[in-house]
Amino acid sequence: MTHPLLDLPPVTAADFARIEQRVAALLGTGQDVVIMQGEALLPLEACIRAGAPRGSSALNIVTGPYGQTFGNWLRGCGATVTDLVVPFHTAVTAEQVRDALAAHPEIDFVSLVHAEAATGNTNPVAAIGEVVRAHGALFYLDAVASVGAEPVTPDAWGVDLCVIGAQKAMGGPAGVSAVSVSARAWERFAANPDAPRASYLSLLDWKERWIDGGRKALLFAPAQLEMLSLEACLERIGAEGLDAVTARHAKAAAATRAGALALGGGIEPFVYESKDAAPVATTLRVTGGPDASEVVAKALALDPAVPLVAGGGALAKEMIRVNHYGVDATRDVVLAALAAIGGALAALGQEPDLASARNAVTETWPGE
């Protein structure tokens, strides 16, 4: 018997090219866009393996755990790496980047995470892009968590490699991702003798066999469900309007932050300044009493549907993350998440002010 999710026709080259064009439109880019058949770590690593040749010099900006991962990859490629590390409760500044580049004029590659969902901060890419462009380095940006939650415009910002994934603010599948590649990034790849070739990590294979070939023959059989889900996700964003989608995420973040400040009970925003807080997710610090992991476990027992997780690794004891992205970027979800956190805190002996939290959310995000 037939099954709508199993008996799917293959994704053709024309289908694949059409979806790539829709991703390019989402990013407002005239650069080449390559869709890759895997979670966003695939193009993130592929870009570094090709773009940071042995003997190159990289500035790796660390504002969260993904920045740390990029530094490890860069060193593994044989690049000399200067880490610019800032506290995870804040954002890097363009002035800090300018100073680092001035101190190391040999730097030819800059890596940055736009929004760190794991720590809840976001970085001022437009201002940083001006600095990197003036220096002449290749600019690599992880926009996986930011795309759909805030503006992402690689051409305007001078980004040479902009990697996105659909599984967060875009509200799409996790098993497919994409990267926009500038002309000078392609030149860097081609000049790197260690750039992956004949490999699943090879962007040059896509350039030579797919893009230069007129997008007529795919390198392998694409995953139908992921590609169809990505196109459906892009259609949904188009129907709502990208500006409306990003505005919805901004409202969710502002309402969550306001509600958490009013809730009390030993909870406060993890990111100190609202201007540094990412719209994709809000991180909260547990300042006294129970561990964050205890609070999250108790909250999920009260309401299993709320998008709450404890921080990873060393942050598990102090951080709660409210993942108000995609379809969860709504006022009802924010209210439910704060109610669950408040209920958990009360059960663990704290004294949250649930009424004030609800009022703060509804004042920040009035009903429509």
Image (tube, rainbow, N blue to C red):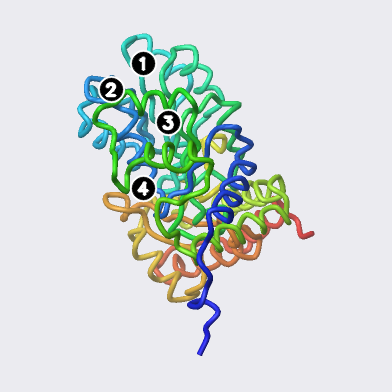
In the displayed structure, 25 sits above or below 286; it is above
Residue denoted by label 4? 41
Badge 2 or badge 1: first in the primary sequence: 2
Mark 4: secondary structure: helix
Left or right side of 245 for 141:
left
Residue 71, quarter of picture: top left
Can residue 121 be seen from the camera position used here? no
Badge 2 or badge 3: first in the primary sequence: 2
Residue denoted by label 3? 140
Residue 291, quarter of picture: bottom left
Mark 2: secondary structure: strand
Task: Find out whether the residues at labels 2 and 1 contact each other: C-beta distance under 8 Å.
Answer: yes
Q: Position of residue 148 (x, y in %)?
A: 59, 47
Q: Nearer the viewer, mark 2 or mark 4?
A: 4
Q: Residues within 10 Å of mark 2 (few under 14, many from 20)?
A: some
Q: Residues within 10 Å of mark 3 (few under 14, many from 20)?
A: many
Which one is in front, 106 or 285?
Answer: 106
Residue denoted by label 1? 100
In the displayed structure, 262 sits above or below 31; it is below
Amino acid at dot 3: Tyr
Badge 4 or badge 1: first in the primary sequence: 4
Residue denoted by label 2? 82
Mark 3: secondary structure: strand
Which one is in front, 257 or 159?
Answer: 159
In three-dimensional space, the C-alpha distance between marks 1 and 3, rounded to whole angstroms, equals: 16 Å
Badge 1 or badge 3: first in the primary sequence: 1
In three-dimensional space, the C-alpha distance between marks 2 and 1, rounded to whole angstroms, equals: 8 Å
Task: Find out whether the residues at labels 2 and 3 contact each other: C-beta distance under 8 Å.
Answer: no
Task: Find out whether the residues at labels 1 and 3 contact each other: C-beta distance under 8 Å.
Answer: no
Which one is in front, 114 or 1?
Answer: 1
